[in-house]
Image (spheres, grey):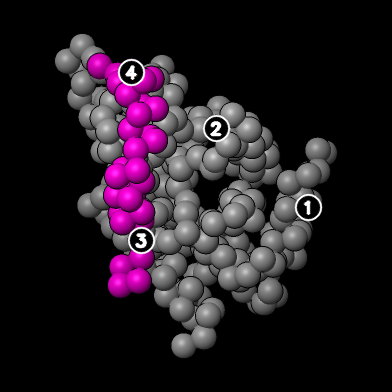
């Protein structure tokens, strides 16, 4: 099995798990996934395909450069975006990549990022469509949320999917890196969904599943008069503990690696 086939198999397995109906992360054509093939190329879910039933022909091998160049354009039109999405396909007969391939190309250009997952979980969107979105993004309620989701999540104000959203995500992620001197683990999109990423599919799932758990706890605690948030001192201590770093590494390590 060559690298393309191996990476595609990993991407399909990740997509199928994120797309399981019982998980309530995505339905119909919602959400998308991607995986790095090299510095220049990546695989991404085709537009309109279903995560839960994704097939090899529903993935598109793309060139990163046309999309990364487009993210630098301040006055690009919808036609420019459509042209770049079609032009980036390695196989010109392949399906159209998701318009959100723009932010996938960005994340996969970052150090250590090999896989990206984006879904629209009911539990998380219940908060992202509410006045409590910023509290959920920037405060923490229990230790494992810190371990798997980081000290805070990036919160991106609602932006139309496509070029503007890709640019907003890049800008907010860069602001996080400057402030915390590390990559975030969770990107929250107001009234939209969640993005997680990492060096393995397990890293993508660990952050996403823990964020969903945190959203459910937040909503339940809010109904009881809370949540009671952890102090910044506690967050800093847990985030800096060596045993927690070891546990996080174990949680995000590829099975069988």
Q: Please give the range of residues in magenta.
A: 228-257
- Give the labeled residue for mark 1: 69
**Quadrant of the frame with the C terminus:** bottom left
The picture places residue 132, in percent across and down from the top left corner, at 38, 19
Q: Residue at x 33, y 50 (%)?
A: 246
First-in-chain label (2 vs 4): 2
| Vertical comparison of 188 with 62: above or below | above
Q: Dots 2 and 4: beta carbons under 8 Å?
A: no
Q: Is residue 56 magenta?
A: no
In this view, 96 is above or below 206: below
Disc 4 to disc 3, C-alpha distance? 29 Å
The numbered disc on residue 231 is 4
- Nearest to N terminus: mark 2 or mark 1: 1
Give the quadrant of residue 92: bottom right
Q: CA distance from mark 2 to mark 4?
A: 18 Å
For the question of whether residue 174 can be seen, the reply is: yes
Cα–Cα gap, marks 4 and 1: 41 Å
What residue is pinned by disc 3?
253
Identify the element where label 4 is drawn. Answer: loop
């Amino acid at each position: 099995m060559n690298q393309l086939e191996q990476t595609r198999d990993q991407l399909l397995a990740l997509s199928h798990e994120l797309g399981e109906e019982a998980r309530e992360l995505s339905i119909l054509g919602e959400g998308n996934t991607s995986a790095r093939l090299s510095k220049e190329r990546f695989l991404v879910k085709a537009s309109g395909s279903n995560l839960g039933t994704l097939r090899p022909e529903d993935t598109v091998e793309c060139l990163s450069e046309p999309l990364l160049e487009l993210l630098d354009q301040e006055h690009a039109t919808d036609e420019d975006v459509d042209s770049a999405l079609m032009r980036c396909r390695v196989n010109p007969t392949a399906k159209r990549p998701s318009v959100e391939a723009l932010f996938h190309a960005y994340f996969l250009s970052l150090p250590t990022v090999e896989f990206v997952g984006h879904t629209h979980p009911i539990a998380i969107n219940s908060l992202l469509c509410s006045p409590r979105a910023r509290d959920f993004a920037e405060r923490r309620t229990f230790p494992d949320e810190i371990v798997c989701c980081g000290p805070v999540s990036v919160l991106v104000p609602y932006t139309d999917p496509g070029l503007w959203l890709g640019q907003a995500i890049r800008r907010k992620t860069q602001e996080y890196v400057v402030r915390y001197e590390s990559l975030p683990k969770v990107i929250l999109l107001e009234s939209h969904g969640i993005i997680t990423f990492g060096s393995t599919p397990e890293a993508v799932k660990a952050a996403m599943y823990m964020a969903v758990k945190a959203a459910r706890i937040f909503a339940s605690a809010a109904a009881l008069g809370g949540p009671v948030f952890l102090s910044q001192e506690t967050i800093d201590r847990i985030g800096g503990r060596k045993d927690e770093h070891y546990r996080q590494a174990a949680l995000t390590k590829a099975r069988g690696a």
